[in-house]
Each structure stands twice: as structure tokens, then as C-alpha cells.
Amino acid sequence: MELLILILYILLSITLVRALLSLLRRSKPGRPKLPPGPVPLPVIGSLLKLGDKPHKSLAELAKIYGPIMSLKLGQKTTVVISSPALAKEILQKQDLAFSTRSIPNAVHAHDHHKYSTVWLPVTNQWRSLRKALNSNIFSGNRLDASQNLRRQKVQELIEYIGKCCQEGVAVDIGSAVFKTSLNLLSNTIFSIDMADPTQDSVQQFRHLVWRTVKEMGKPNLVDYFPILDKIDPQGIRRRVKSHFEDTFEMFGRLIDERLELRRSGKSGAENDVTDILLNISEENGEINRTHIEHLCLDIFGAGTDTTSSSVEWAMAELLCTPETLQKAKAELVQTIGKGKPIEESDIPRLPYLQAIVKEIMRLHPPAPLLVPRTVETDVEVYGYTVPQGAQVLVNAWAIGHDPSVWANPTSFMPERFLDSDIDIRGRDFELIPFGAGRRICPGLSLAIRVVPLMLGSLINSFDWKLEGGIKPEELDMDDKFGLTVQKAQPLRVVPFRV
């Protein structure tokens, strides 16, 4: 308690000094014009306005202060963007000026920010890592070549649910899809299944990923008061470090096994991502062992949680609107045939299924505030100055729920996309769940294949009812915030065949 009081006194003193300096600066001519925003409280600024769901709180504030606003969060100035036009300005027109990441203190654990494609600045190292991702994992040719793998893993998911169907037991959709996503990625990278879809052995890893994402997405006092860096008063960086250690231990063991096989001359048949990255490491040294481990952390952290969350939200929304679910089923029956496997090549022939995926990305973007950015010099945007060092957030959730952009924005209406050219690939700023510009999520190309493939397969193979006889209108659709947004209550449904 005494330590906390001391910290508060120190912060109050610093804030008073800064306030005096700020008053002096205001008297000088030519002072930069900040975007409008709420009047900050002493010491804490507008931190209390964030609440436990910042994407929604910031959207409400934007209704008052406009699509570009500034908030003082502790000692940090944060600029929030909440309209398609301003998002285009930040992510496309002035992309380079806003390309640097604002790095949360938690990401400093194990120096992750020095090796991660997510957090590195746009440097030669970042370009090399991004090239490795784009060329060896997410390129069209590589994804085409791995279609059989995805088909196999989705079929295993359907077989697992078929077993649940026979036994009359409920399925945790998020958990089941997470296991499938994990095995997709682990086979792509390590040529192994990291989870048995019929067992709960992967629950620990799923919780590890979620806890990591949740911790990194929490409001952290150290981010707003850098003077607290050494103390880490909430213990967030300490817990993230522990989660990273567990994850790196697992990846390190798999990489060691592969290196041993290569030394013994028994490797080479896999030619998976691990082999490719190790080859790059041996040939030119652009990527080393540490880079590979951190790259795996990025891929598994982003690729499993976001996919499972999107499919879970889609199933929940469909079960809440039975007429929409029936339309999706009818399209699949007519185009594919009831109960028949879906191929990735079928997806372009399923416009209603594609519309459902777009509508889910609008209503429930996986990263509602995208990944935070910062500016290294003062930048002018629409007559306002974004000051050097300010954090910049693009509220994709607010844009997706803006009534001036979308009719009935809170309603689940896939039909809105049937006669629309709006897509999720970063060109249409009304819908940017994966961001845009040079720092668009590299996993986009995989996500637009996997999410409709899994969702369509679940819809076409089974009928569903909510566990416990819950009525659609009674289903809890609340969310919980982290770097990704999950359903607050997992979706548990009972599959059956008719």
C-alpha cells in the first residue's frame, strides 16, 4: 500500500510539472492543433473512459468528438481514427508515416519486439521476415499446394463432430475449430499434429494462447506511465514472459528435433516451413534460430485464435437468425449437395457464404483496434496535428458499426454484401478487419480460404441446436476484449442429422 501511495505521489508530481509546461506551451504562437477530445483528469487523463471494452467506449466517444480525436491516457497522447476516410488517410495515403508500431510494454518480454514481424519497424530485417512469410507460407502457390492438408484437417473436424452427433453431446465450437486451426498450422510449419481433435490435450495450449493475447491486450499502466517500467505494477510483462517461455520451449523442442534429423541426413521429405526457414538461415543468415521461434509465435498466436473466434461468432450469429442459416444451407445444397465435402475451389460459387464471412468481419473484427501505430515526427491529418510519439488506433469495430456507413449496423444482415463490391482485402476502408497498406495482416490470404471452408463444412454437414434448449434470442452474444475479441461465453451446440 505504501509503495502504491508513493507511486501515485510521483505520478501526481510529474503530471503537475507537465501541466505547467503545457500551459507555457499554449501561450506560444504556432502551437500544433491536436484533434478534439475529452478534457483529461489530473494524472490519469482519460484512462477511466476506456472501460473493459475500449473498442466500444472509444466508438461512443467518437460520436461526441468526431472521427479523429485525441485522448490523454496517462502520459501518452493517443489519437483514435473512426471513419473510412480517415482510415484511408492513415493506412494508405500516409502509410509510411504511420507504419511504425506503438509497442506495448508486454511485448518487450523476451525481446519479442526485436524479432517479431508484427512489432518490428519497417526495416530491412522486417522486410526479410515479411518476405519469408509471404513467399513460404501465404503465397498463392504455397496455399494452392497445401489445399489437400486443409481438406484433410477439416474432414477430421467433421468426423469429430460426427462422433459427438452419434453420442448426442454438445460441441464447443471455438475449441473444436481452434484444434483444427492449430493442426493446420502445425502441419504447415512442423509436419505434425499438435492436437488430437478427439481429445482435450490441446486445451492447455489454447488457454496459453488466449491468456497471452488477453494479457497483451489489457490496458497496462506501464504503457501510460513509462516511469513504472521497472516495477511492472500489474505484473503483465512478467506473466507474458512466462507464457512466452512455455511457448518457446515447445517450439524449441520441435526445431531441435528437426535439426537432429537434418544432421543425421534423415530430413528433407517434409520440405515444410521449418525446413525452408532453416535453409534460409544456413544459406544467408538473414533469419536465425531466434527469428524462427518468434516467427512461429506470431503465426500461432495470430492464426489460431482469430480463425476460431471468427467461426464461433459466425455460428452464433447464424443460430440467432435461423432464416439466414436456412439460406446458407439452401445455397450449399444447391451448389455442392447436402452433406458433401466442400472444396476451396467451391467458395467463389457460394456468394451467400462469402457474404456471411464479410458480415462477421464487420460485426466482430478479430482485432477491433487493429495493431497500434505511432508516429516518429509530427504528422498533419485533416488539419490536425498527430504529435511525435503519439499512439494511433484505428477503430475497425467503430467503422463497422457506423450508421452513416452501414444501414442497421448492429443487425446481422449478410444480404448487404450480395450486391456490393466491398471486400475485406484492405482496399475498401469501410471494412478493414485485417488492416490495410504495407502492414496489412499477412495471414489474410489464408484466412479468406480457411474461414469459409470451415464454416461452410459445419453448416453443410450438420443441423444444430443450442445446448440446454436455449432459444436463439436467449443466447449470450456479449464479448470480452483482448488484442482479439472473443465470445464472453463459449458457444456450445448439439449437432444432429436430419
Image (spheres, helix red, strand yellow):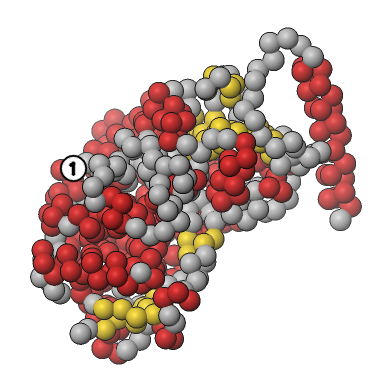
Residue at 15%, 43% in the rendered image = 141
Above-or-below relation of 145 to 336:
above
Q: Around disc 1, counting alpha carbons within 10 Å, would you say few (fewer than 14), some (14 to 19), or many (20 or more)?
A: some
The image quadrant where one finds the N terminus is: bottom right
Q: Camera-side residue: 200 or 275?
A: 200
The image quadrant where one finds the C terminus is: bottom left
Check disc 1 and report the residue beneath it: 140
Above-or-below relation of 165 to 208:
below
Q: Quadrant of residue 36?
A: top right
Residue 290 visible in this rendered orientation of the protein: no
Does 185 sit left or right of 147 as displayed? right
Q: Camera-side residue: 47 or 241?
A: 47
Q: Where is residue 150 in the image (x, y as percent from the top left)?
A: 21, 60
Does 24 sit left or right of 121 as displayed? right
Residue found farthest to the top: 29
> Hey, what amino acid is under mark 1?
Gly
Q: In which quarter of the image is residue 276?
A: top left
Residue at 41%, 59% in the rendered image = 411
Q: Camera-side residue: 275 or 266?
A: 275
Residue at 46%, 46% in the rendered image = 403
Does 442 sit left or right of 351 as displayed? right
Q: Where is residue 257 in the image (x, y as percent from the top left)?
A: 32, 57
